[in-house]
Image (cartoon, helix red, strand yellow):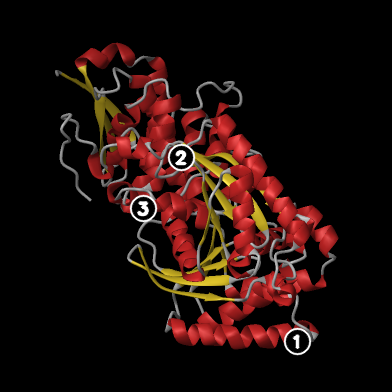
Amino acid sequence: MTQTPDADGIDWGPFGRPLFQDAAALGLSRVGVIDVGSNSVRLVVFDGAARSPAYFYNEKIMCALGAGLSKSGHLNPEGRIRALSAIRRFAALAEGMGIPPLTAVATAAVREASDGADFREEVLRETGIKLWVIDGKEEARLSAQGVLLGWPGSYGLVCDIGGSSMELADLADGRVGRRLTSALGPLKLREIKGGRKAVKAYVREVMQGLHDEMGNTKGMRLFLVGGSWRAIARVDMERRNYPLTVLHEYRMTARQISKTAEYIRKSDLQELRGRCNISDSRMSLVPLATIVLKELIRAFKPKDVAVSSYGIREGMLYEQMPRELRERDPLVEACRFVEDKDARLPGFGRILYDFVKPLFPRANWQRKRIIKAACLLHDVSWRAHPDYRAEVTFDNATRANLGGLKHSERVMLGLALMNRYTSKTSNSRFEPLFAMLDEAQIKEAEILGKAMRLGAMLWLTAEEEPGTLKWKPKSRELTLRLKEQARPLFGEVAESRLAALASAMNATSSVKFVKS
């Protein structure tokens, strides 16, 4: 990616000019969505950088609207009362927050129930909210767009499981292709007579039909969307003693999924849900969802499996984005937003990126975006107590709601920011997470952190570059070239930080002052 200077005369580099202040993005700065599913009703209010929004408010009520639907043909009466109460509450909350009219969608249960239209009329009458009922293929499209919110340009197969249905969508070159829907939601499966064996036979038959209709997807990535999938992933983390319990972008293999399915089958579900912090109503559906997942893996044979916390609600936000915003990197846009909001010198992250960039001449585009993110975030935690600032920055990076980050990249970003504030990372309480990186990545994070630590000593303004680093890998020579007006900034602390950086790089260092 190349970028020419903008109309403001600033060359913003390969990531382009920030868009979060544009009119189109500001229109998405706070958006409320209600998702009326077969199992739960949820309100999400998005806020912040539109391309990678934060969850300003997120509340879910387990209503089980679709329980018993296959037999009765009606919405679950108790679930209907609870759902209406939840929507009434959500409408009042949205009004108090000053949010524009809520967008509300309903999926399989309301779509299929004979009293679904009556329920919609009741919701409109009681709350003033119009429920849009979407069909299965539209549900699949929106869920796939939710995946694109976190992974621009993704390819693979998206599988969204709800209470009463399961949808599939093909992704290629960042576009949604073929879409299919099925009745493989666990609320429906538990109404099948004949026990586990009968359920498994039914799921296998339906899944094979879906595979035949979808076409060859062998070797593609499988994105899992939906609460039951996330619950299984959380149990997988528990079984593996996985150190970073962030579900978004969590990866599993077919073998791990098989082991976890057996682990669930043999476990006391009440005890397991307590350890994994899974609701009772959700946990009751997990055994059936594991049958569906195993058959999904058997039929489609994906190369790997990634959990997406982004789904239909995020897809509805993505739907409203202009094309230019959709194509932006969600990680970089989110970090720019945070820098603008929290840093002492907003805009310096771009200067700092140019300052440290020569130290990483072989960095590919994936590594460059991590370096860029670190530079943008290098100063946003300055309000934290100095004794804990390094830990705060690591914790924020690894557990923040950031899209477009693998777990190992979260740790690398966090470790770089930790090195920005301290030279001592050993014996940290976060050390188990460092094992997710190899030695080269740990060293690279150390060098990046120490380079940012040095650059932070050389502030002039957010627009003016104080100097440059020149790195000669063959002779292992590191040279800091400073403008003459920056000479007063290069005191003994800055000198010590340059020496620490050179030591981390196993290099010799020197300083040259040049006229502007």
User: Disc 3 marks which amino acid?
Assistant: Gln
Q: Is residue 400 left or right of residue 84?
A: left
For label 3, the residue is 366
- What percent of the width, then of the height, locates residue 480? 27, 28
- Disc 1 residue crowd, few under 14, some 14–19, many 20+, Cα 10 Å: few
Within 10 Å of disc 3 (Cα), the crowding (few <14, some 14-19, many 20+) is: few
Residue 449 in percent (x, y) is at 44, 35
Q: Which residue appears at 78% of the width and 73% of the height? A: 265
Nearest to the observer: residue 133 or residue 222: 133
Quadrant occupied by the C terminus:
top left
Secondary structure state at the residue bearing disc 3: helix
Proximity of marks 2 and 3: CB atoms separated by less than 8 Å: no
Mark number, residue 41: none
Mark seen at residue 446: 2
Give the quarter of the image for residue 431. top right
Residue 365 vs residue 111: left or right?
Answer: left
Give the residue displayed 39% in from the left and 31% down from the top: 452
Left-right relation of 387 to 366: right
Q: Secondary structure at mark 1?
A: helix
User: Which residue is rendered at x = 28% and y = 48% of the image?
Assistant: 324
User: Can I make out residue 457 in this image?
Assistant: yes
Picture quadrant of residue 343:
top left
Please tell me whether mark 2 sits on a helix, a strand or a loop. Answer: helix
Residue that numbered label 1 is attached to? 197
Q: Position of residue 63 (x, y in %)?
A: 72, 56
Which residue occupies the foreground of this view, 85 or 256? 85
Q: Mark 2 or mark 1: which comes first in sequence?
A: 1
Disc number lying in front (2 or 1) = 1
Q: Amino acid at mark 2?
A: Glu
Q: Residue at x 62, y 75 (%)?
A: 184
